[in-house]
DNA sequence: GAGGATGTTCGACGATTGTCGAACAAGGGT
DNA sequence: ACCCTTGTTCGACAATCGTCGAACATCCTC
């Protein structure tokens, strides 16, 4: 059961943007941007675990994250290097919760 | 009938991203990024004028464009300065049709 | 004023999306 | 072996979205 982690360059830009254009997923990405990897269950943003699993799948299939299985947990991390290389400025522009004038 | 051009800072980031996460709208934005202003009818991307009008409305209400009425035409332009100030790097990351390594 | 050009608005439609509970799968601990 | 924890998958549902044709509104030019 391969985890469907596409080459980021093969993902349409609109798919990357669509993956980021959701409040829950954006919160996940912001949490991931702290660095390191986190188990799926650590993202408590008021949705059921089914929904959370769905959002993580969207992020993974958009090429934004990688997942590593370990025991019963699955650790998720942001593909920041590739993102910054392919879309410089995108993450930074999107990560700040509120931008002053 | 005011044209609903919100303060960009008041638009949720997800709404800005969602506005860009569509192929037709992204083509429009890329055309607009050439600079200057264009009448609505100049965006011929294989959709009906009703659909085109809809997409331009989405872009406008996401704070991405401004519209100026002149005669029977309405001229659209990209709010590039504000976008680059509020989301530095976003447009640049998204505008290139293909990103080299 | 009649006619044409340019856009917008109004349903309507199919498709996609976000959400959930329930069922399922796989591992770890006792 | 059992059970609990962690995640995924499977319908199902409501809501939203992209699309269109048709009708409408405005303005410009004869």
Image (spheres, coloured by chain):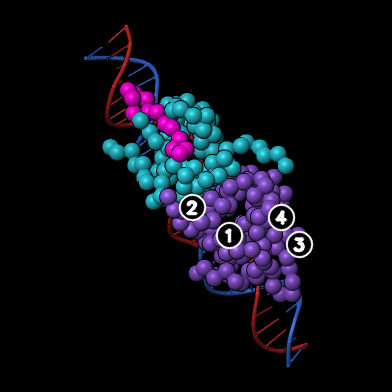
Chain colours: A cyan, B purple, C red, D blue
Q: Position of residue A38 (x, y in %)?
A: 44, 27
| C-alpha span from label 3 to label 1 | 24 Å
Picture layout, residue B39 above or below residue A67? below
| C-alpha span from label 2 to label 4 | 23 Å
Q: Earlier in the sequence, mark 1 or mark 4?
A: 4
Q: How many marks?
A: 4
> Do we see residue A83 in this rendering?
yes
Q: Earlier in the sequence, mark 3 or mark 1?
A: 3
Picture layout, residue A68 above or below residue B68? above
Asked whether the residues under marks 1 and 4 belong to the same chain, the reply is: yes
| C-alpha span from label 1 to label 4 | 16 Å
| Residue in the picture at 51% in, 56% down | B96
Question: Which quarter of the figure is the C terminus of chain A placed in?
Answer: top right
Under circle 1, the secondary element is helix
| Residue in the picture at 53% in, 52% down | B94
Under circle 2, the secondary element is helix
Magenta highlight range: A69-81
**Residue A45 or residue A35, whichever sits in front:** A35
Residue beneath disc 2: A14
Which chain does tag 3 point to? B
Asked whether the residues under marks 2 and 4 belong to the same chain, the reply is: no
- Per the image, is B43 magenta? no
Residue beneath disc 3: B1
Residue beneath disc 4: B5
Residue beneath disc 1: B29
| C-alpha span from label 1 to label 2 | 12 Å
| Residue in the picture at 45% in, 39% down | A81
Q: Position of residue A20 (x, y in %)?
A: 52, 43
Under circle 3, the secondary element is loop
């Amino acid at each position: 059961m391969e985890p469907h982690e596409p080459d980021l360059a093969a993902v349409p830009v609109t798919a990357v943007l669509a993956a980021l254009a959701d409040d829950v997923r954006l919160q996940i990405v912001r949490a991931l941007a702290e660095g390191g990897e986190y188990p799926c269950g650590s993202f408590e943003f008021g949705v059921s675990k089914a929904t959370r699993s769905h959002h993580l799948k969207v992020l993974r299939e958009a090429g934004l994250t990688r997942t590593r299985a370990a025991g019963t947990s699955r650790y998720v991390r942001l593909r920041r290097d590739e993102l910054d290389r392919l879309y410089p400025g995108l993450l930074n522009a999107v990560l700040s919760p509120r931008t002053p004038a």
